[in-house]
Image: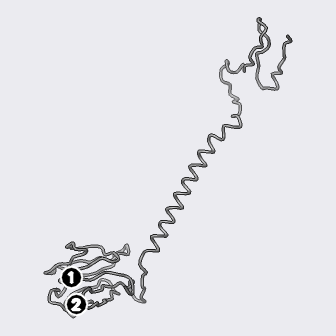
Amino acid sequence: MQRTHLDSKAFGSRYIGGLSKAGSIGLIVRASAWAAPSSDLAPAPMGTWVWYVVPAAFLLGVFGAVTIYGHMQRRRRRRTKPPKAATDSGPPQVFLVQQGDEIVRFVINKTPCRVGRSERNDLTVKHPSVSRQHAQITLRHDGLYEITDLESLNGVFVNDKKIKTAALAEGDIVDIGDLTFKFTAYEED
């Protein structure tokens, strides 16, 4: 059998190869595998970039999908918020709608808005269970309305819980004395 010769310059390293004493073909082995590591490292084979790019692309895709989903949820929540009926002077209008036999709609278009039996209040409710100065509704800095009990005799209840101060949300049921109101930002129910 004939011995083959490999050009070491073509492969960039020294090779050991050829026939052994028994006549079988020897293995071609890089000599640098036995040598100490050199300062000039060979570039990584072309296929290894796949192991870095594919997981990075996958994570980027997941991040993009989560971001788009979150954006869609925020837009959906924004659409379900009640419309704000803006006025020329002051905060947006909200309403206290008195529930019962006769539905009465009270407009709250200034803040703070005092509620009570006295004529000096912003919202006058003529009922014996309502104190002269019963409650106050204010617009907070975060855009939410808040109701505060002004140490009334019969108290203020929001969604059947007695409160001192509570934030009001769309559709909350507010009890002032023996009267029941619904807090809303909609023009009509």
* Element class at badge 1: strand
Q: Residue at x 45, y 70 (%)?
A: 77
Q: Quadrant of the C terminus?
A: bottom left
Q: Residue at x 19, y 85 (%)?
A: 133
CB under 8 Å between callouts 1 and 2?
A: yes
Q: Is residue 156 above or below residue 47?
A: below
- Horizontal arrangement in the rendering, residue 57 relative to residue 98 (left or right): right
Q: Position of residue 29 (x, y in %)?
A: 72, 19
Q: Residue at x 19, y 83 (%)?
A: 134
- Horizontal arrangement in the rendering, residue 124 relative to residue 170 (left or right): left
Asked where in the image residue 137 lies, by quadrant, the reply is bottom left
- Disc 1: CA contacts within 10 A as few (<14), some (14-19) or many (>=20): many
Q: Is residue 10 above or below residue 99?
A: above
**Which residue corresponds to mark 2?**
125
Q: Is residue 99 above or below residue 143?
A: below
Asked where in the image residue 104 lies, by quadrant, the reply is bottom left
Q: Is residue 40 above or below residue 126?
A: above
